[in-house]
Amino acid sequence: MKQSSSVSPVSIFNDVIGPVMRGPSSSHCAAALRIGRLARNLMDNEIDDVLVEFDRSGSLPTTHDSQGSDMGLFGGLLGWNADDERLPNSDVALRDAGISLRIVTVDVGDPHPNTYRLTLTNSNESHSIIAISTGGGMIEVLSIDGVPMSMDGGYHETLIWLNHTPMLNFAADHIIKHRVGDLHLLQVKANDFVANEALELLNPIAVKKLSPVLPIASRKDMDIPFSGCTEMLAYDGENHTSLVDLAIQYENARGAISEAEIIAKMEEIIRILRKSIAIGIAGTTYEDRVLHHQSGKFAELMNQGKLLDGGALNRIILYVTALMEVKSSMGVIVAAPTAGACAALPGAIIGMAEAMGKDETEMAKAMLAAGLIGVFIATRWTFAAEVGGCQAEGGSAACMAAAALVVLAGGTRDQSIAAASMAFQSMLGLICDPIANRVEAPCLGKNVIAASNAISCANMALAGFDPLIPLDEVIDAAKAVSTRMPREHRCTSLGGLAVTPTSLEIEKKLASLKAARCSSCSC
C-alpha cells in the first residue's frame, strides 16, 4: 500500500510506543512541547512574547494548567526535549529567558478539542501557528500565518516566501505551493533542509526551517504492506506469520530501519520502563499530586504473602501502579500508547514476562506486536481521550496488551487478534473523568483494569474463545461511540467523578497549596 501523500502513515515508534517523556498526559505535555518546538523554529529561536488562545468549547481551557499543557508548551518554546528533567519548572525558566506569555480563552469554534493557537513576536517579526494534539503526543500543524498547511513533525520543513513565480532548482519529497496575496509560499518537505545554494538562486523574501520532532523520519512513497487488521490478514493469508514478524515488516517499510534496529530500539524502551518501575516501587514524591506513594506497600505485602493469590497478576498490578506513580511525580515514562494509559501495556508485558522467565528481547518483541495493534487503532481512530474518552486510552492499552500477552505465551497470529478484539470490546464506552483535574485517578484503577482485562482475554483467546466481531469493526464501533459521548466525559474534568464534591474539594486544596508555594517563591 504505497503512501505518496504528505500525510505520513502511522509508525509504531512515533504514534504508538512513545514518546519517552515526563508529565501527566501525552496529549497535553508531549504534544504541546512538540508544537512549542516548531513555533520556536518559526521564530528562529528568538521569542519575546507569546499569545496562546484556547477555544472555549475545547478541552484545554479547563485542563491546560493541571494536566501539563503549560509545562510542555513552555518547555518546547525553550527548545527542550519531552523527557527533560527541568520540565516541572518550565514556567520559571520561560520567565528567566525573558519570554512573556499570555493565555486567553476565545470563541472561535475550533472543531478539534486540543487546538493551540499561538501568536509569537520578537523585535523583528511576528508569526502565528495553529496546531492540534491528535493523541499520544502526536500533532498536526494546520496553518502558519493564516496559510492552511499540514505538517506532523516527521519532515525537515523549509518554508520559502517569494515575490515571484518560483522556478524550482532542487528536488524534495513534497513541494507544496501556497499563494499568499501577491506572494508565493513554498512548503518543502524532505529529509534535510533546502541547501543554502539553492535558496540563494531563488532569491527569497524570507526562509524558515522547522526541524523534525518525531523519532522516525518521514519520506516520500512509503510502501507500507497494510494499515488495518483486515488488510494485514489478506496480505499474510494462510502464512500465519507471527504478529511480531508482521510488526517488524510494517515498521521496516514505514521507517526504513532494519529488523535489528527495530528490536534494539524497543529493547531500549523496555530498559527505560524497567528502570521507571524500580523507581516507582522505591518511592516517589511530588507536591501537586492527588495520591501518595502506594505501590511500595503493595510490594511489601505481596512479598510477605499477605495478598490474595493472584499469581502473575499481582506482579502486574505492582508494576502498573509503580509506573503510574512515576508519571504522577513527573518521572520518565513511555506513552504506550498515551501517558494517561502508560502503565497497563508495559506493566502487563514486563510483569508477565518476568514471571515466565523471559528476557528483554522477548519483552521487546511482545511490545512490537502490541505496537502493530496500536497502528490499526491510530490509523482508523485516535488515542486521545479528549476525542474518545478513556476507551481511546485504557481501551486501546487493553487491546494492545492482550495481543502482546498471547505472543508471550507462544500463541498464534489469529489468537493475538482475537484477544485484542475481546479486550477492546469490553472497554467500549469508558469515560475520562480525572479526579481533581489531575491524570491520576481513576486513571490508576483504569490502567489496572486494562491490564487485568488483557490477561483474561489473552487466556480466553488461547483457549479458543470466539471474539465474534473483527478487530477493525470494534475500533470503528469505539469511534462511533465517541461521537455520542458528551464533552463532559472526554477529559474536560466537567463530568463523572471529576465533579463530585470530594474531587472538587481536592482540586481546591491543591490550588491553594500551589498558590501558597508561588507566593513564597515569588513566581
Image: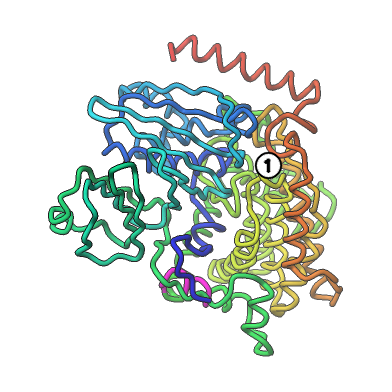
Residue 371, compared with residue 322, is above or below; it is: below
Residue 283 in sight here: no
For the residue pair 203 and 21, the one nearer the viewer reads as: 203
Residue 174 in sight here: yes
Residue reaching furthest to the bottom: 238
At x 49%, y 9%, the residue is 519
Query: Whole-percent x and y of residue 511?
Result: 62, 18
Residue 223, compared with residue 266, is above or below; it is: below
Please tell me whether mark 1 sits on a helix, a strand or a loop: helix
Looking at the image, residue 472 sits to the left or right of residue 97; the answer is right
Please say whether residue 5 is one of the residues in the magenta stretch. no
Residue reaching furthest to the front: 182
Mark 1 is on which residue type? Ser
At x 71%, y 80%, the residue is 412
Looking at the image, residue 138 sits to the left or right of residue 483; the answer is left
Looking at the image, residue 331 sits to the left or right of residue 344; the answer is left
Q: Dot 1, how many residues are within 10 Å of its Cα: few (below 14), some (14-19), or many (20+)?
A: many
Q: Circle 1 is placed at which residue position? A: 295
Q: Which residues are magenta?
A: 249-257
Residue 436, compared with residue 256, is above or below; it is: above
What secondary structure do most residues of the magenta stretch adopt?
A: helix
Q: Quadrant of residue 197?
A: bottom left
